[in-house]
Amino acid sequence: DTAVSQTPKYLVTQMGNDKSIKCEQNLGHDTMYWYKQDSKKFLKIMFSYNNKELIINETVPNRFSPKSPDKAHLNLHINSLELGDSAVYFCASSQDRLAGGETQYFGPGTRLLVL
Amino acid sequence: GENVEQHPSTLSVQEGDSAVIKCTYSDSASNYFPWYKQELGKRPQLIIDIRSNVGEKKDQRIAVTLNKTAKHFSLHITETQPEDSAVYFCAASYPSGGYQKVTFGTGTKLQVIP
């Protein structure tokens, strides 16, 4: 199942480092998302892009910077990593028609551990 | 913005029994309600969804009901099996600024005891 893919799958790094996570979808969807899932399993949306345009930015620290080079890719760069950034980060995509909402297809997740 | 509450946070049932998970939402403009299942270490995946013009939808052992007046919707799993053990998330999607936003519930960890 490679509809939505993320790299890397695991990321272990030291506090203060800068790291990036990449996401690609081959579903032809217009909208992509980044979610953070903490140890309590809460799924919290961070960002959403529609056709390379940022449409949702949910009070995420500015150490997190998403970039969408085209509508099939949405990358997440994190500066000055902190212990609290340890979580699983999921990328997702949806067709996002204007009427009614759409299913989101999730990537496999990137497990980030900050030491 | 939308607020979605989900209960219970954990649920244990005997194999073969039914399981019910309930969610409430706050924004009457919400028009799409998906349910996602997340197995341990895996990604969330859609198992069933319902739109606001429908009151009930069923797919084999899984059903979802929607009460727009009361702003709540529920997931029903009948004849539970061990492979139903997972975390289940409800969500509510609503129009905002020309797009659809989605808010997830806090998840229910379902354990089916063989």
Image (cartoon, grey):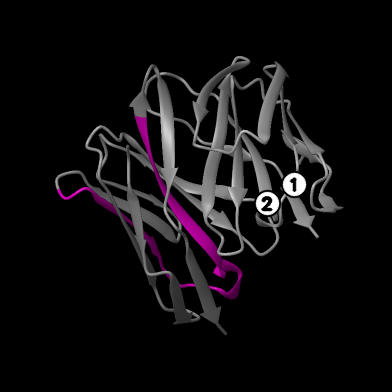
Q: Is residue B73 left or right of residue B83?
A: left
Q: Quadrant of residue B62?
A: bottom left
Q: Residue A49 location, x and y as percent?
A: 58, 23
Q: Residue B85 location, x and y as percent?
A: 57, 70
Question: Above or below — where is B76 with respect to B10?
Answer: above
Which residue is painted at 81% across and 60% down in the image? A115
On the rendered image, what quadrant is the N terminus of chain B found in? Answer: top left
Membership of B88 in magenta stretch? yes
Residue sitting nearer the eye, B79 or A83: A83
**Amino acid on which the number 1 mark rests in the picture:** Leu
Question: Above or below — where is B103 with respect to B88?
Answer: above
* Residue position for label 1: A81
Q: Main secondary structure of the magenta part?
A: strand
* Residue position for label 2: A85
| Region of the chain picked out in magenta, as a range | B70-94
Crowding around mark 2 (Cα neighbors within 10 Å: few <14, some 14 to 19, many 20+) is some
Q: Is residue B1 left or right of residue B80?
A: left
Please, which residue is most extreme toward the left here? Answer: B69
Residue sitting nearer the eye, B54 or A30: A30
Which residue is painted at 62% across and 33% down in the image? A62
Crowding around mark 1 (Cα neighbors within 10 Å: few <14, some 14 to 19, many 20+) is many
Distance, label 2 to label 1, CA atoms, is 7 Å
Residue A8, numbered label: none
Q: Are marks 2 and 1 in contact (CB under 8 Å)?
A: yes
User: Disc 2 sits on a residue from what chain?
Assistant: A
Q: Quadrant of residue A91?
A: top right
Q: Quadrant of residue A38?
A: bottom right
